[in-house]
Amino acid sequence: MTDLFDLTGRTALVTGSSRGIGLTLARGLATAGARVVLHGRDQATLDAAREDVLASSDVEVFTATFDVTDRDAVDSGVTRIESEFGDIDILVNNAGIQRRAPFTEFAVDDWNDLIATNLSSAFFVGQRVARGMVRRGSGKIVNIGSVQSQLGRPGIAAYAATKGGIAMLTKGMCADLGPSGVQVNALAPGYFATELTKALVDDAVFSEWVRTRTPAGRWGDTQDLVGTLVFLSSRASDFVNGQIVYVDGGMTAVV
Ligand code: NDP
């Protein structure tokens, strides 16, 4: 039974794993036995993240710096991972940003940054990595979505659009890649305290709204996401494809 979730010998790339949700997810995959590639834009931050992962597991850890919004950088970054560390069996498209402003005042630069970082990135990295998976006839891709693909909230229409895009990109990728033995699912978190949500955590009224709006009665702890990611990355989910799994303490289940 436990073998179903064993990731020993698998190689995982988690984009945006220098901190926050991505770092916890990378640590979780390493604990399940996977060799992991930590990714971000700053080598010093990644070196510290590498020490963090190695403190709780003895797997091999590689680091890669590239901007996920730059297609050429993605291509050369993934090529370097494949040649220096090995083929990627598990891809977690996690890198993301947030921008907030009322819709009528939303800056076009912020719109473009959100689309590039949260959505085009999953297309660029997903397409580049999927080619190898298709050739080998197996692979697991997990796109990080959000409860915002289901909930309308003030000030974040553009962010919600990117996460709605992630939901449908996931289903489309499933349709194209499923016949080649590649499963593509989305893991959609509720509210988690990270750098991305710092302004919300610091807002006492909003913070309390999250607690009362969530049946679990609390914000998520990034560790809450690990079990679902390991499941979606392992043999245990071989017949699960194209699904959006909400890990949100029940937030999207209730009004
Ligand atoms: P953080 O801000 O803590 O981390 C974001 C990560 O993305 C960092 O590692 C950062 O790396 C990386 N990143 C951002 N832009 C780029 C880029 N252009 N190129 C490469 N890497 C980049 O955010 P979270 O951990 O909170 O968010 C992770 C994911 O989870 C995002 O997709 C987010 O939308 C999603 N999510 C988060 C929720 C939450 O409550 N926190 C809820 C629902 C979804 P660096 O800056 O070091 O280069």
Image (tube, rainbow, N blue to C red):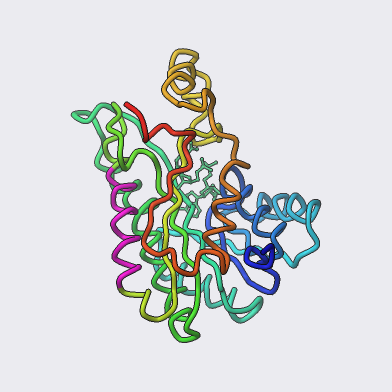
Residue under the image location 45 percent in, 51 percent down: 187
Residue 19, position in %: x, y? 61, 45
Observer-nearest residue: 92 or 102? Answer: 92
Observer-nearest residue: 246 or 156? Answer: 246
The quadrant in which the C terminus is found is top left
105 relative to 178, above or below: above
84 relative to 193, above or below: below
Residue under the image location 72 percent in, 57 percent down: 31
Type of secondary structure dominating the magenta stretch: helix
For this orientation, the residue located farthest to the left is 104
Residue 142, position in %: x, y? 47, 59
Image label count: 0
For this orientation, the residue located farthest to the bottom is 135
Numbered range of the magenta stretch: 161-175
Q: Is 213 left or right of 2, judged from the image as shown? A: left
Observer-nearest residue: 247 or 196? Answer: 247
The quadrant in which the N terminus is found is bottom right
Magenta stretch: residue 171 in it?
A: yes
Asked which quadrant contains residue 176, the reply is bottom left
For this orientation, the residue located farthest to the front is 1
131 relative to 231, above or below: below
